Image: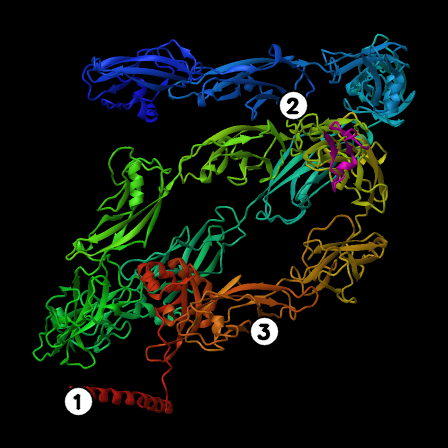
């Protein structure tokens, strides 16, 4: 029974000679013994090892072990093997003892055997018993640190060596090889890494910095693993080693403060030596601690503040050195009572390396104590107020203006309340509570107590008392207020309101109403005066004393039907208190307006309808309106005669109520009066009507209007042919275009298109005949087949239709019968169209191949045969033969009977196997010598093969190689030989025909057996060379094997050839590469460039040649990061961008592999590990913290130098190095933000204010740079937005009136009533912002202020002043002076105000408007060049105006009331209107306005006049003319951005290509003169030929003055494609010129069949006006770009030039390609309905493809010359043709 090991494939392969059967032949005198045996050490006792077979024995064979020795020759008493009989002639060898290779690996065993016969001999022999290794031992640690622990300082550098260890394994080969790696627990910790040295020691290195405070001990676990062994199912063994790395503390860390941040509150005035704060720090080095020292090093906002504080150097206790006053600190250091101290703590040591320090900021807030009393700014204040003032009205303080109070303490200590003492409840103060400081207002509490008659003045005390303190400090001030007397009773109306009516048109003085009111006051205050005002108040008079109202002007209800008036009752002679009520006046209607039509003339269009009443396209309404009220405004409509008699029986009727005109009867255009036909639009005739509108008033009023109704002709008559039938006769051979007959039809419609007839064939015959579309001439059609033998038809009946051009198109029809006459014209035909034939190659001459045969139905035919062409030849592979000359002489044909025969003995199938040819037959007796009667047939000929070629090898000799020990049947190579013959003749077989004796003997010797055999064999069919036995490289003469192979075919007789083969025997690969001197780790910079060297790897291999050639490879996980310079160099390079911040180190597995090309056998390899550590470079810019709360917000009163906000950034580079240390600064920019903000400490990103921000509210943006300290430094930026908020610090500024008052006055008519507008005032606070800039107004309490009141306008900062009381008479008061206050931030405690003075002048009612003396003075006229500077300039003086009454001495005001809509002019008035000048205020532009007519009005300054047109009768107006002179300032613009045109190939030099290139400018002559040119170097083309190679000149020229493009070359007849170039236009080089513009031009090269001809009934000018519409319609229908090439007068079929029609030639482009005309015409046919707008708008007569232009009809002598030319050209041609016919007949 075989062992498991023997069954294992690997074991069987290795031990096949030992463990398998061994034969021993016994001879009486000689035995061949067993000499060697190998057994694995793990085999069990009793395992079968092998069998021994004996021959020629006489009896049972027996065997026994005699002795066993070791390799040291030591004798042992242990049986290793034993023998057991298997049968009579065989013994089994079994294992007798356990084996252990590590103890004994070789035994020498002597044993003996015999056949147990008495006379049989006993034979002794020796066996060498080898014990083979299996992997049965784990690695064992031999070298490692004592006590399994190591101690290192925490400051040890990364990549430093820690310790090494070594393990070995007594097993062999893979089982004895040991590899090391760190346990996963150690790898995960990431503190250490390891490398294996060339001595196979495992060294451990530091991967990450150590920190005693973080961890004092680390555990490193190393695993040693062997490589397994043979057999391969034996597992690998591992052994672990645990080493403890203890970390020793070093005092290298800086001290750290506790309880951060350090914040403390302290009261002001603390005694000296008082404790403030005890700061504490600790040493981070817990294993080795030092004493700490404290100090103060800095203070903010000023270092001077350090004088107040002291610190204990040992305890860190901060104490007071001086007493501190919070209010002094706030004032002296511009702070809010906060102080920042910088404390430093450092280690107390003399060792320089151990010194370190830290700093921290102590934030101290000084707390306030109540050490200040509330205080008023003044001890005494005066004020005034009107009696009966409403509640909350403030008292006006005269001196000082405001009551101010303040307390310098903070918060609760500075909070105080305000009360009044001694006012009897009349007033209260606001605010009632103040913190720190504020303005106090005294306001009315009880208006009833403000009675001037009871108490004209009052004095009281305002007290300020602290509310939140224990002390309750207080102070007071005295306020004295004077009351002002007022008129405090108002008139009262007897009725609440009044409502009256009056007829329009009543006379002046007619009473309307009477009003009445009473007043409780006495004296002048009790007398009531009455006034009316409001829109329309001038239409009425009211008595001031009685209240009676009468009509004062003409009342017209249609203008104003209702007046809403205000009636006011006033006391105190009309200047006191007032009370108003409403008075409504309704105007009643009378019939005083006639109906008015909306137009003096109406017209409408309608289409004729002779069968029913036609309708208008939309309701036709003539409407009139009446301004009166119903029933006076109700209207009726009638159609009347010229004598205004109502018509009821005409063609039309009208709706009496609505005015809609309707048809009453059918209307037939043809029946209407031809005289009413329109000469311009002849398809219309018309009716003239008169329509009357009558209102229903008493008496009734009426009006009339004219109505024209145009009747459009409708196509309602179909064409009618003159005859119902027509007849014609033709020959079957007649050509296309042969005339047959003419048909004619007429149409009764009178208009052009409805009666214009075109003809068309419908149905059968359309493919054989054509009819003239316009003339009805019938011709034989193009391509018509009339051959009776083919059509079997001799009679055609055509249906011809006549169509008119109306809409819809109508038609008529007729029948044309055409008879076809037969002609003899039959052609010959072959019986077969294809003939198949064969011929044997190398056939003899004249060998018959095939006969072709043709017939002809004509009786007189004479047929002749010939080979027309050799169409194609193909070889055996069906490849087409390019050169027909190879075979076109091999065959020929008999011309009389069509027999084909061999013409050449060189017919070769290997050249051509299949031939296709065309044979032709001709009837040489054909009727027409000009039209040969021919027929053709195909002959397919196959050439048959004979054996005429021996096989031929692909090569003259073959070489290959074979490895020693290669398995049998291994394919070495394939030998190929080819035979061009076919079938068996081309079938090839192979055999080896000769052997080299010495080589074959060597091959036989490798068998190790008796006999011989061939070790290289060949497959006779495939030519495959294979190994047929074991080949040994080491045998004599076995480096090469040479044989000869024969190839032979199977033809009759067979042919053959031979070839030599040379086989090289190759050696095997059996040595592993070795890597040496590989370091534990390599350090490189992380920015190492791609391709830079990392390390040179050295390896050797004991093999030679390719087996000793080593290639290197990096493991897949690192192959992107690192690579080798080339496979063999061993130079390890950087293969990809490295980044320490992503991967700090790499463990690279390097494989060294021999025979790495794998072309010459197996490869052996070994791997080793290389650690690559990346050194940091500064390649990371700092990154800002994205949690920063932006934007920062501060107030404009923000203290200088105080904190605005803090930003921070981090850097990913290596910590605690300059590469990661960040500094901050602000980027200087073009703005002003960096003027206000800065970063004082570059190590901290704290942004502080640099300078005061007062008045600088708004949004500021700064760019903060965070930059590291690496080389080179890197940075990033952060845009920081800072909102500086506005604080109300600025007083309002008056704009109108200005302050102080400068020649500003307001004029009002004397006795102006209350409520009239006085002036618009305007103030702003442009420095403040938001609500701080909102402005409110009040009238100051002055003597004249009572006459006025003020109201703020919505949505802006303006206000309007109105009169509050009636002004006095001019004689009593000529001017009024008062003051207006502008207040910002209304309702705010810090509201500010500015006061301005106002002056109002009274104007006498007797002063009228001044006037100009236009008769004695010239009309003012000025000229000014456009855009001339300066823009603001005086143009000249104007004549002043004057008052007609010399007694009036008053100022004159001037206004531009017309012609200056853009406010481009102004007036400068001096000396109260005695001098006036015209000013230009804005830049003038002639292209906007060329001439100004300014209307200047002179007024008495009372009101600003409204806009007014020039009125020659108004002497208060002056007309001033200003002319703007043109300059060259406008751009040049082309009419299009690109132009296209077409040029036909028949055009010649100087032909006009296009005259549409136009450029213009809106400037005037001579600035609008254009100069054109073609831009050089802009030429481009996509022609079908190289233009520039044939022509040496530009293809086109352009007229410099007109822009007309001319052809500059004669186009080639076959030219097609596009020319592209650029045209430039420029205006004169004066003023701002020259201006230029460019346009692209595309010119298409066209043949005549590229253009569509449109024949239109219109003039060229009419077409050009609507050309864009024409193109738009065409492009919409065709979806292609339409280009108009030419517009000419139409030339008809008779070559007559038309003076009615024009021809428009158009080409179409799509995707830069010309669209064929037929395609366009097909599109038109498919979209006929879409072309209706084209027919209607452009009177299209016809659309056709362009025919070559024929010259106009020659006249007089021109006809004779033309005939002479035709005869002289055609006659010689006819003579030559006749001579040719005669010659051919003679030849026959």
Residue 364 makes an appearance in the image? yes
- Furthest residue toward top: 470
- Furthest residue toward right: 379
Position of 1212 compared to 1163: left or right?
right
Is 515 above or below relative to 1421?
above
Observer-nearest of 905 and 918: 905
- Furthest residue toward left: 859
- Gap between marks 1 and 3 measured at Cα: 70 Å
- Gap between marks 2 and 1 measured at Cα: 120 Å
Circle 2 or circle 3, nearest the eye: 2
Tell me, for residue 1601, which label it has, or none.
Answer: 3
Residue 1097, x across and y down, in percent: 56, 34
Position of 1591 compared to 817: left or right?
right
Residue 1481, x across and y down, in percent: 75, 55
Circle 2 sits on which residue?
A: 160
Magenta highlight range: 1222-1251
Q: Secondary structure beneath disc 1?
A: helix
Count residues near mark 2 (Cα–Cα under 10 Å), then give few for <14, some for 14-19, many for 20+.
Answer: few
Give the quarter of the figure containing the C terminus. bottom left
Circle 1 sits on which residue?
A: 1786
Tell me, for residue 1478, which label it has, or none.
Answer: none
Observer-nearest of 1396 and 1727: 1727
């Amino acid at each position: 029974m075989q062992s498991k090991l023997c069954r294992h494939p690997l074991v069987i392969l290795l031990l096949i000679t030992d463990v398998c059967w061994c034969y021993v032949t016994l001879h009486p005198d000689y035995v061949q013994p067993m000499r060697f045996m190998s057994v694995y050490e793990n085999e069990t006792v009793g395992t079968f090892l092998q069998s021994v077979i004996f021959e020629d024995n006489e009896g049972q064979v027996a065997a026994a072990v005699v002795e066993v020795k070791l390799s040291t020759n030591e004798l042992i008493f242990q049986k290793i093997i034993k023998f057991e009989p298997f049968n009579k002639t065989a013994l089994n060898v079994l294992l007798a003892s356990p084996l252990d290779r590590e103890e004994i690996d070789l035994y020498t065993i002597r044993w003996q055997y015999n056949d147990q016969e008495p006379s049989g001999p006993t034979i002794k022999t020796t066996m060498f018993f080898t014990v083979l290794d299996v992997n049965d031992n784990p690695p064992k640690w031999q070298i490692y640190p004592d006590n399994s622990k190591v101690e290192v300082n925490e400051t040890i550098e990364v990549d430093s060596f820690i310790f090494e260890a070594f393990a070995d394994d007594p097993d062999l080969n893979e089982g004895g090889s040991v590899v090391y790696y760190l346990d996963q627990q150690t790898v995960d910790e990431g503190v250490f890494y390891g490398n294996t040295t060339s001595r196979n020691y495992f060294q451990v290195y530091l991967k990450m910095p150590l920190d005693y405070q973080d961890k004092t001990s680390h555990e490193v676990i190393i695993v040693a693993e062997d490589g397994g062994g043979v057999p391969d199912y034996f597992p690998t063994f591992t052994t672990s080693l645990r080493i403890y790395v203890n970390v020793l503390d070093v005092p290298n860390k800086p001290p750290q403060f506790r309880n951060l941040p350090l914040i403390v509150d302290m009261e002001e005035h603390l005694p000296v030596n008082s404790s403030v704060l005890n700061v504490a720090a600790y040493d981070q080095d817990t294993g080795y601690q030092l004493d700490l020292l404290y100090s103060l090093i800095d203070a903010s906002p000023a270092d001077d503040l350090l004088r107040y504080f002291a610190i204990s150097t040992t305890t860190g206790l901060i104490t007071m050195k001086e007493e501190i006053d919070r209010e002094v600190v706030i004032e002296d250091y511009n702070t809010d009572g906060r102080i920042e101290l910088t404390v430093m703590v450092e280690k107390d040591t003399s060792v320089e390396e151990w010194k370190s320090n830290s700093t921290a900021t102590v934030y101290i807030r000084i707390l306030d104590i109540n050490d200040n009393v509330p205080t008023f700014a003044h001890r005494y204040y005066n004020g005034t107020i009107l009696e009966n003032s409403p509640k909350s009205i403030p008292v006006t303080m005269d001196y000082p203006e405001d009551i101010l109070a303040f307390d310098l303490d903070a918060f609760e200590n500075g909070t105080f309340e305000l009360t009044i003492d001694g006012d009897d409840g009349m007033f209260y103060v606001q605010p009632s509570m103040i913190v720190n400081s504020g303005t106090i207002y005294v306001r009315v509490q009880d208006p009833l107590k403000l009675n001037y008659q009871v108490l004209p003045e009052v004095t009281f005390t305002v007290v300020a008392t602290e509310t939140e303190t224990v002390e309750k400090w207080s102070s007071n001030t005295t306020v004295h207020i004077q009351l002002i007397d007022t008129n405090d009773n108002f008139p009262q109306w007897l009725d609440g309101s009044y409502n009256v009516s009056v007829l329009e048109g009543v006379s002046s003085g007619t009473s309307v109403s009477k009003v009445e009111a009473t007043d409780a006051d006495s004296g002048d205050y009790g007398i009531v005066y009455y006034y009316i005002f409001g829109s329309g108040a001038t239409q009425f008079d009211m008595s001031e004393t009685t209240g009676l109202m009468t009509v004062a002007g003409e009342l017209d209800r249609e203008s104003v039907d209702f007046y809403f008036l205000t009636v006011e009752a006033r006391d105190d002679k009309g200047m006191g208190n007032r009370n108003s009520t409403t008075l409504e006046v309704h105007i009643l209607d009378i019939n005083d307006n006639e109906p008015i039509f909306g137009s003096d003339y109406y017209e409408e269009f309608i289409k004729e309808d002779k069968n029913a009443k036609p309708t208008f396209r939309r309701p036709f309404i003539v409407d009139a309106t009446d301004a009166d009220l119903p029933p006076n405004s109700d209207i009726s409509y009638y159609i009347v005669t010229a004598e205004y008699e109502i018509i009821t029986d005409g063609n039309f009727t009208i709706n009496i109520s609505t005015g809609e005109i309707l048809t009453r009867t059918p209307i037939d255009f043809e029946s209407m009066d031809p005289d009413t036909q329109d000469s311009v639009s002849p398809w219309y005739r018309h009716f003239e009507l008169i329509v009357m509108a009558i209102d229903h008033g008493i008496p009734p009023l009426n009006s009339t209007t004219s109505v024209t109704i145009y009747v459009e002709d409708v196509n309602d008559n179909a064409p009618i042919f003159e005859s119902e039938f027509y007849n014609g006769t033709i020959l079957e051979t007649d050509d296309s275009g042969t005339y047959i007959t003419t048909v004619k039809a007429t149409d009764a419609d009178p208009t052009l298109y409805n009666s214009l007839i075109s003809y068309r064939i419908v149905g059968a015959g359309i493919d054989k005949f054509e009819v003239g579309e316009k003339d009805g001439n019938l011709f034989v059609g193009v391509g018509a087949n009339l051959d009776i033998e083919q059509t079997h038809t001799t009679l055609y009946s055509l249906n011809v239709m006549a169509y008119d051009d109306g809409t819809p198109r109508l038609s008529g029809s007729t029948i044309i019968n055409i008879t076809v006459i037969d002609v003899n014209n039959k052609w010959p035909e072959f019986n077969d169209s294809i003939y198949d034939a064969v011929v044997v190659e190398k056939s003899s001459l004249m060998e018959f191949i095939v006969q072709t045969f043709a017939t002809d139905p004509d009786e007189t035919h004479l047929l002749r045969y010939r080979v027309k062409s050799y169409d194609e030849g193909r070889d055996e592979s069906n490849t087409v033969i390019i050169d027909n000359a190879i075979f076109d002489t091999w065959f020929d044909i008999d011309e009389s009977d069509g027999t084909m025969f061999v013409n050449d003995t060189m017919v070769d199938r290997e050249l051509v196997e299949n031939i296709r040819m065309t044979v032709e037959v001709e009837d040489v007796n054909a009727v027409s010598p000009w039209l040969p009667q021919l027929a053709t047939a195909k002959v397919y000929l196959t050439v048959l093969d004979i054996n005429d070629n021996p096989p031929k090898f692909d090569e003259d000799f073959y070489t290959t190689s074979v490895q020693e020990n290669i398995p049998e049947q291994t394919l070495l190579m394939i030998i190929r030989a080819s035979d061009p013959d076919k079938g068996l003749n081309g079938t090839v077989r192979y055999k080896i025909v000769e052997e080299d004796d010495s080589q074959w003997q060597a091959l036989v010797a490798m068998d190790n057996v008796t006999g011989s055999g061939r070790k290289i064999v060949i497959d006779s069919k495939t030519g495959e060379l294979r190994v047929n036995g074991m080949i040994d490289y080491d045998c004599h003469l076995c480096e090469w094997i040479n044989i000869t192979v024969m190839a032979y075919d199977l033809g009759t007789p067979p042919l053959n050839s031979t070839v030599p083969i040379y086989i090289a025997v190759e050696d095997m690969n059996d040595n592993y590469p070795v890597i040496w001197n590989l370091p534990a780790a390599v350090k490189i910079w992380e920015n190492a460039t791609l391709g830079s060297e990392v390390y040179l790897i050295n390896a050797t291999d004991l093999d030679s040649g390719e087996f000793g050639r080593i290639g290197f490879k990096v493991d897949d996980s690192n192959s992107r990061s690192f690579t080798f310079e080339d496979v063999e160099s061993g130079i390890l390079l950087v293969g990809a961008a490295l980044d320490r911040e992503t991967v700090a180190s790499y463990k690279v597995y390097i494989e060294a592999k021999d025979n790495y090309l794998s072309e010459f056998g197996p490869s052996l390899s070994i791997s080793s590990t290389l650690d690559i550590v990346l050194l940091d470079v500064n390649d990371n810019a700092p990154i800002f913290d994205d949690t920063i709360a932006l934007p920062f917000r501060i107030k404009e009163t923000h203290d200088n130098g105080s904190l605005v906000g803090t930003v921070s950034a981090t850097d990913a580079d290596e910590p605690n190095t300059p590469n990661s240390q960040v500094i901050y600064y602000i980027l200087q920019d073009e703005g002003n933000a960096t003027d206000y903000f800065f970063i004082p400490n570059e190590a901290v990103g704290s942004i502080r204010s640099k300078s005061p921000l007062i008045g600088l509210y708004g949004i500021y943006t700064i760019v903060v740079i965070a930059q590291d300290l690496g080389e080179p430094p890197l940075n990033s930026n952060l845009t920081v937005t800072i909102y500086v908020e506005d604080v109300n610090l600025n007083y309002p500024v008056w704009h109108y009136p200005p302050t102080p008052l400068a020649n500003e006055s307001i004029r009002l008519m004397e006795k102006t009533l209350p409520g009239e507008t006085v002036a618009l005032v305007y103030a702003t606070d442009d420095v403040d912002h938001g609500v701080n800039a909102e402005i409110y107004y009040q009238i100051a309490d002055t003597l004249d202020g009572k006459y006025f009141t003020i109201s703020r306008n919505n949505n802006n900062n303006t206000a309007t002043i109105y009169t509050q009381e009636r002004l006095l008479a001019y004689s009593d008061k000529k001017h009024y002076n008062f003051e207006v206050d502008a207040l910002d931030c209304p309702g705010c405690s810090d509201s500010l105000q500015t006061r301005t003075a106002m002056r109002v002048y009274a104007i006498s009612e007797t002063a009228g408007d001044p006037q100009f003396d236009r008769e004695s003075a010239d009309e003012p006229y000025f000229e000014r060049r456009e855009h001339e500077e300066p823009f603001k300039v005086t143009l000249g003086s104007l004549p002043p105006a004057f008052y007609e009454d010399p007694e009036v001495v008053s100022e004159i005001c001037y206004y531009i009331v017309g012609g200056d809509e853009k406010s481009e002019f102004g007036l400068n008035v001096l000396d109260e209107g005695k001098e006036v000048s015209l000013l230009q205020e804005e830049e003038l532009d002639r292209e906007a306005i060329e001439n100004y007519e300014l209307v200047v009005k002179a007024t008495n300054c009372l009101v600003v006049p409204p806009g007014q047109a020039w009125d020659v009768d108004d002497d208060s107006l002056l007309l001033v003319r200003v002319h703007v002179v043109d300059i060259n300032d406008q751009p040049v613009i082309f009419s299009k951005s690109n132009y296209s045109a077409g040029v036909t190939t028949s055009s010649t030099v100087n032909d006009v290509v296009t005259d549409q290139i136009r450029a213009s400018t809106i400037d005037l002559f001579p600035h609008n003169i254009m100069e054109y040119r073609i831009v050089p170097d802009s030429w481009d083309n996509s022609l079908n030929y190289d233009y520039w190679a044939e022509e040496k000149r530009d293809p086109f020229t352009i007229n410099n003055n007109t822009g007309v493009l001319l052809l500059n070359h004669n186009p080639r007849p076959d030219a097609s494609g596009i020319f592209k170039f650029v045209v430039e236009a420029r205006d004169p080089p004066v003023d701002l010129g020259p201006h230029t513009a460019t346009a692209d031009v595309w010119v298409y090269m066209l043949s005549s069949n590229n253009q569509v001809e449109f024949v239109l009934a219109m003039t060229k000018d009419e077409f050009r006006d609507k050309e864009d519409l024409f193109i738009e319609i065409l492009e919409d229908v065709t979806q292609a770009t339409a280009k108009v090439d030419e517009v000419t007068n139409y030339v008809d079929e008779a070559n007559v030039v038309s003076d009615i029609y024009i021809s428009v030639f158009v080409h179409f482009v799509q995707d830069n390609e010309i669209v064929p005309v037929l395609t366009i015409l097909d599109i038109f046919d498919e979209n006929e309905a879409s072309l209706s707008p084209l027919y209607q708008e452009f009177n299209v007569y016809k659309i056709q493809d362009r025919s070559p232009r024929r010259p106009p009809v020659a006249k007089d002598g021109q006809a004779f010359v033309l005939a002479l030319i035709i005869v002289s050209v055609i006659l010689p041609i006819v003579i030559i043709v006749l001579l040719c016919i005669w010659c051919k007949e003679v030849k026959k």
